[in-house]
Amino acid sequence: MTRRVTQTAAFCLRRLRYQPSIPQRSCAIAVQNFSTTSRNNATTAAAPKPAGVQVPVDFAPTTKPPSARPTETRKSQMIRTYTSMLRTTPLILFFQHSNITAEEWAAIRRELKKALEAVPATTSLPGSAPVDISSHVKLEVVRTNMLNVALKIVEFHDPEAAAAKSTTARTSRGPIVHDLSQAAYEAINKDVPEDSAYAQIQPLMVGPLATLVIPAVSPAHLAAALTILAPVPGKFPAPKKKKSPGFHDSTCQNGLAKLLLVGGRIEGQIFDQSGVNWVGGIEGGLDGLRAQLVHVLQSAGLGLSTALEGHSKSLWLTLESRKTQLEEESGEKKSE
């Protein structure tokens, strides 16, 4: 049976064949060298490991060439990207989409950008300068299976705890506890607790998904995004046709009809659609939420001081009335 030559080798041979400056003997030598190298590599790969010899965990065999796939489409790179997004982004919305075309995605992103740019800059901390985060809000299509794995890694894999274990694989640089390590694989393949955040969001990890990534918990930006992606009459009304004619265009409307809000992840907690609407409906944004918190604390302190003052006042009145009663009784006895 004739030995099959891979496409890469055949391509090299064709290049050698159509170069007149290289004699035919050189082509034969190249073929012989290629066959010898392939046979040696196959023999080396198939050879059994000597007893007592352990291959390093970071060993890369010569028979396994580097991947030819683009970096952004590799599964390992996608998992790293998703885990980084989940760890650094406090507000993420999840949408299910169905056969949305590229033109429809472009129309949706255009209207979303227009609505977000109308939101004034917000402050993340009291006393800090206002920051405009509209340009950092992204609506992206994600790979459901890879995002599912990334969610499990972020919640169940603890690199510090894995590094402290003696069974964790180690190299000269230290323990291997990154998101693609054996320790992370063992951590995510355990039973999922029912009260975990992943157990709540797991039913949503079905079908094609898209994520809206907001780099800060800004109810104002969330409300502006909901008016475009998931309008609610009376609470998050869609823009009028006179103000935003592109939103009412057939291309944009067809795309929005195929987009469904299924939930969100805010500060590590899972919210359904009603919970997302509640966060987006906070009046005044973070400043309004801080004002409400201050009002609650002040009301609690005022109520406590009023209650303590009322008890002390009632005790004083009781003692005074008893003192008056005793003085009257003693006066009556003296008169008799």
Image (tube, grey):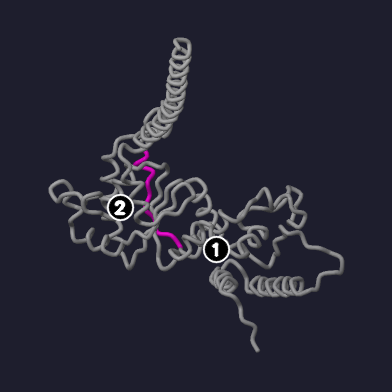
Residue at image coords 34%, 55%: 274
- Residue positioned 31% across, 64% down in the render: 100
Viewport quadrant of the C terminus: top left
Image quarter of residue 48? bottom right
- Relative vertical location of residue 112 with respect to residue 46 in this rendering, above or below: above
Q: Which residue is mark 2?
A: 109
Closer to the eye: label 2 or 1:
2
How far apart are the alpha carbons under marks 2 and 1? 31 Å
Toward the bottom, the furthest residue is 1
The x and y percentages for residue 171 are: 75, 52
Q: Secondary structure at mark 2?
A: helix
Can I make out residue 71 in this image?
A: no
Q: Amino acid at mark 2?
A: Arg
Question: Up-down: is 239 above or below 35?
Answer: above
Query: Where are the magenta residues, as a range?
Result: 133-143
Give 72 or 133, whichever is nearer the viewer: 133
Task: Residue 116: tell me if it is visible.
Answer: yes
Q: Is residue 37 left or right of residue 5?
A: right
Q: Residue furthest front?
A: 336
Image coordinates of residue 173 in percent, x first then y, are 73, 47
Q: Position of residue 301 (x, y in %)?
A: 43, 29
Image spot of residue 324 (x, y percent): 43, 16
- Identify the secondary structure beneath mark 1: loop
User: Residue 68: which numbered mark, if any?
Assistant: 1
Residue at horizontal 36 percent and vertical 63 percent from the top: 96
**Residue 84 drawn above or below residue 122:** below
In the figure, is residue 303 to the left or right of 34?
left
Q: Nearer the viewer, residue 188 or 113?
A: 188
